[in-house]
Image (cartoon, rainbow, N blue to C red):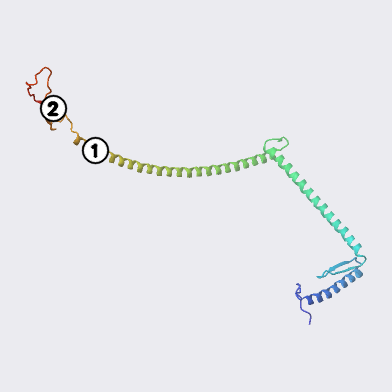
Amino acid sequence: MGRGKIVIRRIDNATSRQVTFSKRRSGLLKKARELSILCDAEVGLLVFSSTGRLYDFASTNMKAVIERYTREKEKELGASAASEIKFWQTEAASLRQQLHNLQESHKKLMGEELRGLSVRDLQSLENQLEMSLRGVRVNKDHLLTQEIEELSTKVNLIHKENMELCGRINIISQENMGLYKKICEIRGATDWNKSLIAPDSSNPNVPINLELSQPQQKDGERSGARIPELGLQLH
């Protein structure tokens, strides 16, 4: 009966983890030695345990293996950098060509440098201009429609506000008319009361009070010969 499949994960138990590390380290070093002998390969192996202890194996010399590894990595990085530079140079050339094509197309659309074009090219250019003009007109009509709708909405709001203001003005006018009528009534009652207190002298039906008054003594008359005179005074 074969062994069950082991789940590859960290071993929690410290003792079991150390035993497993020792067994698998020995197996790994054995495999590295066999690979170097059987395949004539230059092998370098470095292992650091969880406690920081170093275990290494080199088929020739560890320093030589590390130096060779450094050189190869530098070559790979240089090749990668060179390939990346070449890629961006290609992209830059493509963008420059696209820019040149756009500039030429813009000049043709503006009516410049048309001498070398054939009739078919001119017809294609005319069709492009008509399509562009049609698109511009559509956008213009759309914008004008939006502006007209906004202005119509504003007009409706202003008309509604005017109607509300007219209603308020009518209410204020009615209140003013009521106040004016009250003032007229109060003034009429006041004038009638004044007419009762101070009657008009031109009316013959108003009674006249009469009082008697003694005449004053004239100069040169004797004091013993006073003749009474009757005088009337109107009040």
Residue of label 2: 233
Q: Which residue occupies the extreme bottom position in the image?
A: 1
Which image quadrant: the C terminus? top left
Which image quadrant: the N terminus? bottom right
Residue 62 image point, x, y percent: 90, 65
Q: Quadrant of residue 24?
A: bottom right
Residue type at mark 1: give it: Thr
> How packed is label 2: few (under 14 Cα within 10 Å), some, or many (20 or more)?
few
Residue at horizontal 75 percent and vertical 44 percent from the top: 96
| Mark number, residue 147 | none
Residue of label 1: 190
User: In the depicted view, which residue is nearer to us: 72 or 133?
Assistant: 72
**Secondary-structure class at tag 2:** strand
Residue type at mark 2: give it: Gln
Q: CA distance from mark 2 to mark 1?
A: 32 Å
**Sequence order check, earlier mark of 2 and 1:** 1
Q: Which is closer to the viewer, label 2 or label 1?
A: 2
User: In the depicted view, which residue is nearer to us: 21 or 204?
Assistant: 204
Q: Is residue 221 left or right of residue 92?
A: left
Residue at horizontal 37 percent and vertical 41 percent from the top: 169
Q: Is residue 161 left or right of residue 83?
A: left
User: In the depicted view, which residue is nearer to us: 126 or 169?
Assistant: 169
Residue at horizontal 74 percent and vertical 46 percent from the top: 95
Q: Quadrant of residue 20?
A: bottom right
- Vertically, is 212 above or below 57? above
Residue 2 image point, x, y percent: 79, 80
